Amino acid sequence: MGRLDSKVAIITGGARGMGASHAEKFLAEGAKVVITDIIDGKKTAEKLGKNCTFMKHDVTKREDWERVVADTEKLYGPVNVLVNNAGIAKIRPWEQQTDDEFEMHYKINQFGVYLGMQVTVPSMQKAGVGSIVNISSIAGMRGNPNGIAYTATKFAVRGMTMCAALDFGKYNIRVNSVHPGVIRTPMTMENPDVDKSLVEQMGESNPLGRIGDPIEITNLVLYLASDESSFSTGSEFIADGGQIAGL
């Protein structure tokens, strides 16, 4: 018996990094998984196996969300699990932050999560049970230098999660947020806007003395997606190696 047997999951930003890690673990635990992304994820889906399907998806567009949910239902049935994982991070000093970049963070990191919850919940109501896992960040728990746009959206995800938990509980739909610290993913390690030496220093300064690996977030997301977390909703789950424990 798998921990996600009979579950149908949509994971955004699933073509690589943490999203692909979540998908791999979900499949191993018995779920049927749709990974979505703005970049091509067909090879990832093929690698993950027969119960994984890739769908091209711009999370900022309602029509894309409606198509993804409808096509998922046709393939696998009503959706039980939504992991709002897609996101961007561009680190800028205040004086260099452009309006376009700020709006892009809002559209992907915040508005995309709002759309995902609103469009997917009716499918979860059909299923009779649901779990939404919103990937925020420790940037949603504290201020960060040169991170006004990213931090603003991650705080918003935290707040929207609490509101959604209050609204959707009557439908037996749980909503929780996950707040990773520095994780070794393409968005962190291949991002031209991120100073790699600073990333390594942040890892070394953790009580655990290192950067996290995607699987360490995946295991937490799996728990929240499964029935094991059946009494957890509206909660914040931090996995940062102890980075903000002393704040």
Image: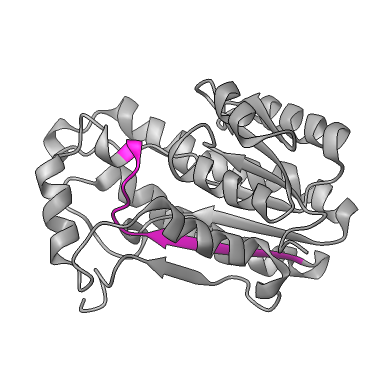
Residue nearest the observer in this picture, 229 or 236: 229
Picture coordinates of residue 246, whole percent (x, y): 20, 79
Image point (38%, 66%), residue name? 239
Is residue 139 in sight in this rendering? yes
Residues drawn in magenta: 173-187
In the displayed structure, 74 sits above or below 125; it is above
In the displayed structure, 200 sits above or below 58; it is below
Image point (54%, 54%), residue name? 134
Picture coordinates of residue 89, whole percent (x, y): 32, 39
Q: Quadrant of the N terminus?
A: bottom right
**Coloring basis for residues:** one colour
Q: Is residue 209 magenta?
A: no
Q: Quadrant of residue 127?
A: bottom right
Picture coordinates of residue 198, whole percent (x, y): 11, 48
Image point (63%, 40%), residue name? 115
Picture coordinates of residue 183, whole percent (x, y): 32, 51
In the displayed structure, 96 sits above or below 83; it is above
Q: Quadrant of the C terminus?
A: bottom left
Is residue 163 in sight in this rendering? no
In the displayed structure image, the side of residue 238 where residue 143 appears, left or right: left
Q: Quadrant of residue 32?
A: top right
Q: How many marks?
A: 0
Image point (59%, 60%), residue name? 222
In the displayed structure image, the side of residue 89 where residue 45 appears, left or right: right
Residue nearest the observer in this picture, 5 or 150: 5
